[in-house]
């Protein structure tokens, strides 16, 4: 972690840190990058890295997955993806950009576009990010906006230390809502009928 913090943030991906000495990369290159304990993304051809998931964020992600995936499967709505699955933004106006949400969801009608040995060739319909202690609102706001520019319909940014969730939707320059432990996540038109108590993320 000390070495990672010494690296400069990437101005196009300020939620992560640029990997020095690596030339321009494609999303296909990202799939072949060796596993060394970090999580990597490529943004506009620049390889950036983030620390591995901390236990608190991991618990939040698992709780939400355990609530979301059974609902999605029971209703045949689509696919919920894990943190290491790469979404390719190439066809959404962001060349050489591959992001790895902590959880993602895409609709069932997109499944024929997904190939087993390739990145997922579109932005997630829902992206979920659990912010780490080193990520502040400004940088996560930028990441949420990048998802929305790519075509995501909703982004949930979870703040483990604040016990809140920012909800981002297209057409908004700021979160359309900030949910507290008294509120519920709502799948809206993206995952119709799905709700999840925010408080259950943090128990």
Image (tube, rainbow, N blue to C red):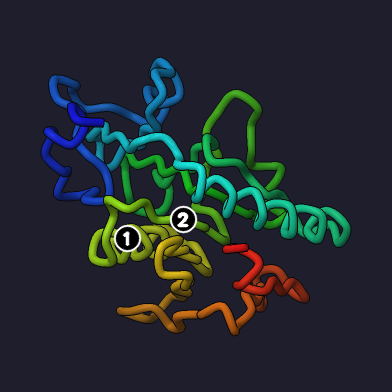
Q: Residue at x 47, y 73 (%)?
A: 164
Q: In which quarter of the view is residue 195 placed?
A: bottom right
| Tag 2 secondary structure | strand
Count the marks: 2
Mark 2 or mark 1, earlier in chain: 2
Which residue ends up furthest to the right in the rendered image?
Answer: 74
Return the residue nearer the eye: 192 or 17: 17
| Tag 1 secondary structure | helix
Q: Residue at x 53, y 68 (%)?
A: 153
Quick one: quadrant of the N terminus? top left
Q: Residue 160 at x, y = what percent?
A: 45, 61
Q: Residue at x 13, y 34 (%)?
A: 7
Q: Residue at x 27, y 50 (%)?
A: 134
Mark 2 vs 1: CB contact within 8 A: yes
Which residue ends up furthest to the front in the rendered image?
Answer: 203
Q: Residue 161 at x, y = what percent?
A: 41, 63
The dot on residue 129 is 2
Left or right placement of residue 87 versus residue 60 in this view: left
Left or right placement of residue 17 versus residue 143 in this view: left
The residue to which callout 1 is attached is 140
Q: CA distance from mark 2 to mark 1?
A: 8 Å
Q: In which quarter of the view is residue 125 placed?
A: bottom right
């Amino acid at each position: 972690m000390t070495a990672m913090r010494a690296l400069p943030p990437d101005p196009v991906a300020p939620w992560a840190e640029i990997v020095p000495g690596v030339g321009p990369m494609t999303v296909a290159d990202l799939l072949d990058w060796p596993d060394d304990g970090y999580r990597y993304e490529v943004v506009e051809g620049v390889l950036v890295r983030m620390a591995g998931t901390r236990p608190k964020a991991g618990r939040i992600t698992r709780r939400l997955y355990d609530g979301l995936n059974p609902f999605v499967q029971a209703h045949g709505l689509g696919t919920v993806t894990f943190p290491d699955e790469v979404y390719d933004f190439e066809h959404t106006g962001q060349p050489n950009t591959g992001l790895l949400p902590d959880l993602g969801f895409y609709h069932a009608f997109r499944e024929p576009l997904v190939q087993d040995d390739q990145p997922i060739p579109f932005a997630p319909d829902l992206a979920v990010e659990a912010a780490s202690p080193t990520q502040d609102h400004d940088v996560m706001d930028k990441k949420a906006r990048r998802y929305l520019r790519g075509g995501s319909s909703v982004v949930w940014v979870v703040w483990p230390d604040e016990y809140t969730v920012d909800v981002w939707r297209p057409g908004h320059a700021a979160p359309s809502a900030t949910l507290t432990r008294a509120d519920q996540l709502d799948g809206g038109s993206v995952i119709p009928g799905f709700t999840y108590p925010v408080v259950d993320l943090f128990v």
